[in-house]
Image (tube, rainbow, N blue to C red):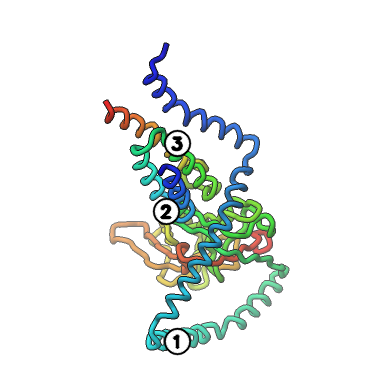
Amino acid sequence: MRALCDILLLTAVFFLPWWFMLIAASMLFFVFGRFYELFLFAFLADLLYAGASARFGGFPFALSALALLLFLALSMVKQRIRV
Amino acid sequence: MRSPKRRSRWLDSAVPFLFAAALAFFLWFYPTALANLAARVAVPLWRAEARAADLFHALALSVRSKQVLVADRERLARELEDARALLLDRELLRDENRALARQLGRPERETRRVVGAVLSTPPRSPYDTAVIDVGRNDGVAVGDIALSGSAVLGVVSKVYGPTSIVEFFSTASRKTSVSIAHQGLAIPAEAVGQGAGAFLAVLPKAVEMSVGDMVTLSGFTSGLFAVVDSVESSATDSFQRVRFKNPVSPYTLRFVEVAHRASEE
């Protein structure tokens, strides 16, 4: 099941808008334990699409950084829900 | 000794940071290795997608009714006639331009352009970039200009072996120096990107401007940057807001030309 979700998310990185992958991965974070794929797929999107851009102050790993913050925030939420 | 629950929490928090640190370390020493690899993996997938889209389009066309096709053909023929009429003076103006450039002592330069297929456009990318299928292997370099016909779209910001990344001038809040042509005058302005091919410039109200004025990129004379779409100001304002739009939408691009910047300036 997890492998299938990973393949679908990977497909989303290549073919769908970036926010779709982020939202889908955030939802799957609550389905599977330690969903590091959230971070990995954001990093892949950064590698594929980031230019040396004026956007995000020229930082080429903005989506990875966002995924990292999301990962920490979702981990906290998940722990609180379980208590 | 840590309890299993605490160890699990520690692991949950530490792994992403350790992973990020390892990646940063790797990228410091090999800055383009992973991106090159990702591009190599992605290109066949994006090409397959384009082929599938073409096939689907062909299938959709084959089931359209004959009446719709006849109406389309007539409309396109009319548009072609109009375009031909508009282009009648193009060669005349080009010759005139060449003669003037020669008189002013500007040598004629060979322009080198490479055509590339667009593999991915916004909104897939959070960076408002497009990926094209020409890269270092085809002589593309960082700073080259991407055009569609004569419309200037953006600049090549990263180059890998088989692909390049094009950043659009219209990316939100990106600033670009431009010239607005109005009744023989070239008015310098700073265009601020608004996304989706739209721009905004703020100019003193005293500067005359009208809808339809052509905008070109400063120092790059071979292409059209945008066309003035609207000029807004209020009676109490001392400035006017000039909105212009690129004639080509970055979201519907299929092919772009990449021009070596130095050879076009």
Residue at image location 37% in from the left, 46% down from the top: A24
Chain bearing tag 3 is A
Q: Residues within 10 Å of mark 2 (few under 14, many from 20)?
A: some
- The three-letter amino acid code for the residue at tag 3 is Tyr
**Amino acid type of disc 2?**
Pro
Q: B102 or A77: nearer the eye?
A: A77
- Please state which of residues B80 and A39 is positioned toward the viewer in this rendering: A39
Of the numbered discs 3 and 2, the one sitting upstream in the chain is 2
Measured from the top left, where is residue B254 in percent x and y?
52, 67
**Considering the numbered disc 2 on the image, is that residue within a helix, a strand or a loop?**
loop
Numbered badge on residue B23: none
Report the residue at 54% width, 64% height from top. Answer: B152
Query: Which secondary structure, mark 3?
Result: loop
The residue drawn where x is 56% and y is 86% is B88
How far separated are the C-alphas under marks 1 and 3?
53 Å
Where's residue B132, x and y in %?
A: 57, 59
Residue at the top extreme, as displayed: B1
Q: Is residue B223 visible?
A: yes
Dot 1 alpha-carbon crowd within 10 angstroms: few under 14, some 14 to 19, many 20 or more: few
Residue at x 41% of width, y 80% of height: B63
The residue where tag 2 is placed is: A17
Camera-near label (1 vs 3) is 3
What is the quadrant of residue B199 in the picture?
bottom left
Q: Are marks 3 and 2 on the same chain?
A: yes
Q: Is residue B52 above or below residue A46?
A: below
Q: Quadrant of the N terminus of chain B?
A: top left
In the image, residue A33 sits, relative to residue A50, either above or below, namely: above
- Residue B99, image x and y in percent? 68, 77
Nearest to the eye among marks 3 and 2: give it: 3
Residue A36: give its label.
3
Circle 1 sits on which residue? B73
The image quadrant where one finds the C terminus of chain B is bottom right
